[in-house]
Image (tube, coloured by chain):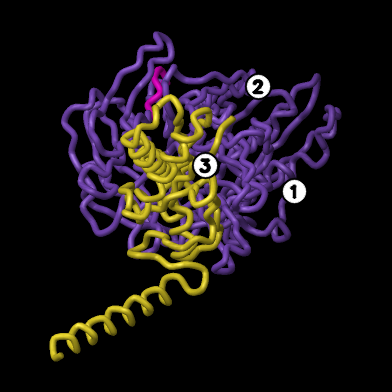
Amino acid sequence: MKKIFYILTLFLFKFNIAYSLIEVDITRGNLDPLPIAVSPLHVDPQSNNYQDVKTKELGELISSIVEKNFRSTGLFNPLNKDAFVQKPDIAHLKPRFEDWRLITAQALVTGKLLIKDEKLKIEFRLWDVAANKEMIALAFTTTPSNWRRVAHIISDKIYERLTGETGYFDTRIIYVSETGPRTQRIKKLAIMDQDGENTKYLTLGNELVLTPRFNPTNQLVTYLSYFRNLPRVYLLDIETGIQEVVGNFPGMTFAPRFSPDGKKIIMSFAEDGNSDIYTMDLESRLVERITEDSSIDTSPSYSPDGKYITFNSDRSGLQQIYIMKSDGSGVKRISFGDGLYGTPVWSPRGDLIAFTKVRGGKFYIGVMRSDGSGERLLTENFYQEAPSWSPNGRLLVFYRETKSGKKGEGFTARLWSIDITGYNERELKTETDASDPSWSSLLSK
Amino acid sequence: MKFNKNIKNLLIILVSTLALSACAAGKKSGVSTGDVYTGSDTIQYLASGVKDRVFFATNKSALTTASRDTLRKQASWMRKNKKLNVVLEGHGDERGTREYNLALAEKRANAARDYLLTYGISGKRISVISYGKEKPVNSASTPLAWSQNRRSVTVKTK
C-alpha cells in the first residue's frame, strides 16, 4: 500500500527568510483564527487527462483539501472563495495585495499545476498579505494519483511556516472499524487518511481484532487478534498483507506497541491470572521480561528516547500510572489524583503523558508531565479512552462511545480529536463506527 | 420476652433493609449484593443444578461465597463426566479501559480455574480465555447490566 513516493522538492526561488508579520500562536486556544485565502490552483490548459484523476477540477479539489485541513486546526479561518477577486493564475504570479487585504485575508495561498507525461507538477506559494511578501515557494513532481497527498504536504508546509510547528496532515490513522449489535460486534482493522478519506480495510472481520499501533515507519502494525480464538499480539505488514504472531507465548499477549526505534514490541503477557510486561526483539526474537509483580501490569508505552516506559498497574490496589527505566528498574508511581488512571501514552515530544481517567462515573482524556505534575483534563464524557498522539504532539485522537438510551439503544463509537490546549474538539469522519485509533508519523519526512 | 422482642425488631429492620437494597439494585430481574450480581437472569445450566457462571465485583477478581458454591458444583459435575473439558471465559464490564479489562477478565477466569483445581480437576481439562469487555451479555448501561457482564463462564468443549 505504501506507494513509493518521490517528491522533488525544488526551491523555486530564493527562500525568503525575512521575518514575517504573521505568526500563529498555537500554545493557547485560538479564539481569533487567522483569516487565510486559499486560491484554487490554476490548472495549466495544456494538462492531459490521467486515469480517473479529474484534471480540470484538480485545482479546486486540492485547494479545498488544504482549506479543510486548515479549518480543522481551529487556528485558521479559510475565507469564502466567492469574495476572491483575482484569478488563480494571475494571483499566483503576483497578487494584488490590496485586493486580498480588502477581504481581510492575512495570508494567501496560490498555486498552479500541470499534468503531462503521466506526471503531476505542482507549485504553490504562501504570501504574507500585510507585509506584501512571499513566504514560501515550493514545487513538487509526483504521479498524478498522489494528488491528495500533495494537498496534505502543501498544508503541512504552510502550517509549519505559519506556526513554527511540524505539520500533521500527511498522515494516516489506523483504527478498529465496528459494525453489528453490541453483543455481537464485528471488528476489522481499517486505515484512512487523517481527514477521513481513502479508507481501506485490512482484515475481514472473521476474528476479533483490537488496539492496532503503527511502527515508526508506518509500514508495520502491531495489534491483538483472536485468530483461532487464541488472543495474541500480531504483526501486520500493510504493504504485503502478511501477518505473523509475535513470539511464542503460552497464553494471551496484548496491549502491544513498538519501541521508538521500531526494533522491539512491548506488550503484556497474561499467565495464570497475572499480567506482566515483556518485550520481544523483532530481529533476534529475544524475549525479555520487564516487570515481575503479582499485580496487573499493562498498557506500556516508551518515552521517545526509548529510555523509559510508562505503564498501567494496580499494584497499589487500583489502576494507576507508573514510569520505570526501560530495563524495568526504578518503578515510580506518577498518578495521585482522585480516580483511576489508564492507557498512558508518551508524547512524541517527550514532555507529556496522555491518559484516560475514570472518576465519578465519567471518563476523561487528560495529560500530565512525565513526573506526574501538571495534570490537565481535556475532555469529559460518559465513556471515552485510548488517546493517541498526533506526530507533532499537539493533538490527541481517541474514541468515544455514546448511547441515546439506558438500555444501550443508539449506541455509537466514534473517533474524536482534541488539541492539548483543551480546545478544538471534533469528531473524525469514519465510514463505520470506530475505536482504538493510532496516529501515524508523517509519511513524508 | 423483652429480649425476644428486640430480636424481632432487629429482624424486621434487617428484612426491610434487604428488601430495600434489592429493590434499588435489582428491580424485577435479579438482585445484587454489593455490586456482585446474584440474580439468575443470564445464567445457563451445564447440568441440572450446575450453574455455568460466576460474577464479580467492580475491579475485583475475588470469588464470592456463592461463586465458590457454583464452582464446587461444577467440579463435582466434571468429576462425574471425566471426558468433558471446559474453557473458562473471563469478562469485564464496559466501565473500564480496554487493555486493563483484558487483564482483569483473565484474572477472573483464572480465579475460577484455581478453585476448580483445588477441587481435584486436572489443569489439562481447563483452558482459559479472556474477552475483556468485548462480549457483553447485556449491552445496557446500568449497574445491573455491568454486574451481569462481570463474569466467568464455564463452557463445555468437545
Chain of the residue under the numbered disc 3 shown in the image: A
Counting from the top left corner in percent of width and height, residue A32 is at: 47, 62
**Residue A437 marker:** 3
Disc 1 designates what residue?
A87
Looking at the image, is mark 3 or mark 2 earlier in the sequence? 2
Give the colour in which the image draws chain B: yellow
Indicate which disc, 3 or 1, sits on the residue closer to the N terminus: 1
Q: Amino acid at mark 1?
A: Lys
Range drawn in magenta: A262-267
The subunit carrying tag 2 is A
Q: Quadrant of residue A122?
A: top right
Q: Is residue A129 above or below residue A161?
A: below
Could you give the CA–CA distance between mark 3 and mark 1, rounded to whole angstroms?
A: 41 Å
Q: Residues within 10 Å of mark 1 (few under 14, many from 20)?
A: some
Label 1 element class: loop
Question: Judging from the image, what secondary structure is the residue with disc 3 in?
Answer: strand
Q: Classify mark 2: residues with Cα within 10 Å, few (<14), some (14-19) or many (20+).
A: few
User: Where is the N terminus of chain B found, in terms of image quarters?
Assistant: bottom left
From the viewer's perspective, is the residue at label 3 or at label 1 nearer?
3
Residue identifier under label 2: A3
| Badge 1 or badge 2: first in the primary sequence | 2
Location of residue A7 (image quadrant): top right
Residue at the spot 53% in from the left edge and 28% down from the top edge? B83
Please tell me the colour of chain A: purple
> What amino acid is at disc 3?
Pro
Residue B141 lies left or right of residue A138; in this view the side is: left
